Structure formats: C-alpha cells, structure tokens
Image (cartoon, coloured by chain):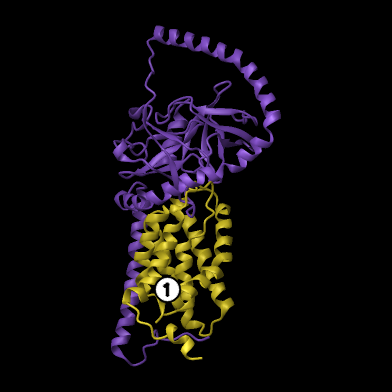
Chain colours: A purple, B yellow
Amino acid sequence: MAPPSSRRPGYDRKAQYGLFATYVIAIIGAIVGLLLLIISIADPTGFNALRAAGNEITRPIAASLRALVVGIGNIDEEIAAYIKAGSQNAALRRQVDANRTKLIEADAIRQENIRLKSLLQLTEADSGTVSAGHLISSTASSAARVARLDIGSLRGVQAGMPVRAPEGLVGRVLRVGPNTADVLLLIDEGNVVPVRRISDNIPGISSGRGDGTVEIRALNTERNPFKPGDIVVTSGIGGIYRPNIPVAIVARLDGDRAIAIPLANPGRVELIVVQRPFRPDEAAPRKATPPDEAPADNGSAENASAP
Amino acid sequence: MIRRYDSRIGRRRTWLHLWGTPVLSVMFGSILVPILPIVAQSPFMPPFGLMILIAWRVLRPEIWPLWIGFPLGLFDDVMSGQPIGSAPLIWTLILLALDIEGQRHFWRDYWHGWIIAALALAFAVIADWLIVHMAGQGGRINLVMPQLVLAIGLFPFVVRLCAVLDRWRLP
C-alpha cells in the first residue's frame, strides 16, 4: 500500500514553508532533549519537581494495585507450605529446640555487650528510623533499577537516606516528592555499599549488577576470600548505612568477585523502613551537597580509603 | 446492505476524539509500567509508550507532526524513570528517521512495517541503556535484550490494538 503524501507539497509555497517549519521544530526539540539529558545525567537529582509530580499521579493506583498483588503473589508459597506442613512441623520443632539454647546465650551476650558499652561510654540506642512505608512500583521498563516508595518528604524522608527491610538492606533514597520517593535499589550498578563478612569481619564492597544480584569484592587481599554461603552485612564505613544491616549471601564465585543474592528481595518485601544516614558529616566530607550525589565514585572513594 | 454500515460511517466526531485518541493512547502506554505494582529485578517491560507511537505511525504515516516526540517523550521520561530528556531526543530522532525512510521506500506492507518498527525499537532500547549506563546506573547491556525481544514480538499486537482504536476514532 502506498502512503498518502502531504509530505510532498509540490508548488504550494505555504505548504513548503509549513513542512520546513515542522522539520525545524522537530530538530530544535531533539536538541533541547539532548540538553535536558546532559543536565539530568550531570545531576541525577535534577528535575525533582517534575518527577515528583509524575510519581504523585501514579502513586494511588500503584499503591492500591500493590495491596491486591501482594496477596496473590504469595499464593504459591502458601500452597507449598500446606502440602509440606507435616514434615515441616517436625523440622521446625527440632530447630526451635536447637535455637532456644542459642537464644539464651545470645541474650547473655547482649547483656554483657550493654555492660561493656556503658563501660566504654558508647551509646547507640538510636535506631535512626525516620518512617516506614511500602515499595509500590518500579521502573520496570528502564535499565535503572529504581523502586518507588509510598512515603515522601511529608514524612521526613530525604534524599540519601538508607532504606531497609526487616530482611536486610534495600537501597538508598534517590529523589523525594511530597508523598513519594524513588529508591536506588541495592541491585543497581550505581549503588555501592561497604560491607564486611559477618563471621570474621573481612571488609569488602558490594555493588549491584542490575539483574537481581550483587557482586562482592574484597578490599585488601589479592585473592578472593569469599566462599559460597558467606553472609555479608553493612560495615558502617562511609557514614550512610548503619552497621550490621544484612546485605547479601554469596551464591557463587566469578574470578576475583563473589556473586551474591540480596537477603531482602525488593520484589517480596512488604514493609520497609527509611533510616537517617549513620554519620552524615562523615558521608559528605568533601562537599556541602547531600551524600546522594555521584553515587558510584563517592562510594568507592570512601571505601578505598576506609580500611 | 448499505443500511448495515450507516451507524458506522459519517459519525460526528469532536476534535478531541479524533486527535486526542492517539495522543492519550501513547500516554496510557507510558503510564502503564509505573502503575504496575511490580518491583522488577531486571528491566523486562517493553517501552509501551514508544511502541504505541510507532504503531500509529505505521498505521497512519501522516498522523504525527514531527515535533510530537518532544512533549510525549517528556511525559514518558517523567513516568518511566529514565533520565529526563532521553525520550524527547530518541523519539524525535525515530520520527525523523521514519519520515526520511518513508520518502525513500514508497511501498509498504506488513513485514516492512514490522521491520522498521523493530529497528526503531532496537535503537531506542539500546540508546536508553546507554544513557542510563552513562548516568552510572543500571547493569550490563545483555539485561535489556529480553525487553527488546518482547518489544519486537509484541509490536504486531500493539498495531492491532491501535487499529481497533482507529476504527473507533474515525468518523
């Protein structure tokens, strides 16, 4: 089929000028787009008002759909749990018995810890919780791994604050609107987190791979000390994340890197908590801007100088 | 026989009905992904806004003024979470390229439409990845390949959908 052709104006001068004008406007539009793009790459928190307006529009729909889907999404687990109920019951009973003694020991250690800390006059009673909310949607069509929160600046959330779930670390707040916030997830390449192995405090850094996993690299050894099954937690270095938030469990090794799976799967966590930065003055020592700027190089520079 | 079609031809249509339909359908495509309550582990959703834009362009080559890529692209960026400015640039470039292509290749059919749409979508998805990569976020390039395959594979369905809308839209 041949297309109609108003793009061939013939001898009509007015039509010729009109056609020319559309090309000019389109090319100007492309150039303005390029300029906007350069600005927004240079300053990832830019155009905050525009984005916040968009998020506010989609928030009510996404939040109500989310409530619907969380129930449906867990059906498979519920069915599996029902089928395995008998054997699971016995296994859990054994586990509870085993855990009871460990719990008592842990209790004693905690008491001792409090006593020792008070001797050293180290007090960290503040958990730094700002507010709690839900992850309601994400940028599923964009390469950046950003999720949306249903709480924002009206509840005290600010850019750069760490976000965690009961299971572990989720990410860091990127942009904030009145009732929404964008979270750069742990699994994004731009999110670099200083970690340590929980068993022996070997320091490392975790950075996202963009596909639901993170890679852990050791800081000070040539050989990769991590093994599958190792659990890493935040070390508190860098000043953004509080220490001892669970981060990931190592799944396999890939050369000098360890590929790990985050303990808090952002697709499954129901409730998240936004925290204050651990030591804000430490997190942004070189510049006056908040710690969310230039995520990749900021984090790695801090980590490189940390140990 | 003619009476049968009386209710379907020569209907009265407002300006909004005629020209708002394609614009609103593209905006709906842009808004579809951020309202889905999925926290994605990897980019798997195709760029529906752009797919609907190209589908209208394939169905009716005259429908879009060349500058429409800017406002619709800006809306798409605000919704999709891409760096602001990426879609205005990419969508306008695609519309310009399709315009030039339309002047070169006069005759068109089903496969021709699908192939040019596939090329345009591949350009858009890879350029989007590159932009996010330059902003220091995202992941490796092979993570956007499922999205690209899905976008190209679903394109004929989107065209069918736009064709249904087009029948409803026209007088």
Q: Secondary structure at mark 1?
A: helix
Image quadrant containing the C terminus of chain B: bottom left
The number of callouts visible is: 1
- Would residue A146 be seen by someone viewing this image from the given angle? no
Which residue is found at the position 34% from the left and 46% from the top?
A45
Residue at 47% of width from left, 52% of height from top?
Answer: B36
> Residue reaching furthest bottom?
A11
- Left or right: where A297 falls relative to A73: left
Chain of the residue where label 1 is placed in the rendered structure: B
User: In the depicted view, which residue is nearer to us: B46 or A218?
Assistant: B46
Front in this rendered view, residue A222 or A211: A211
Q: Horizontally, is A226 left or right of B36 in the view? A: right
At which x and y percent is residue B19?
36, 74
Q: Which residue is mark 1?
A: B96
Quarter of the image for residue A228 reads top right
Q: Position of residue A128 (x, y in %)?
A: 37, 26
The residue at the point 59 percent across, 65 percent down is: B153
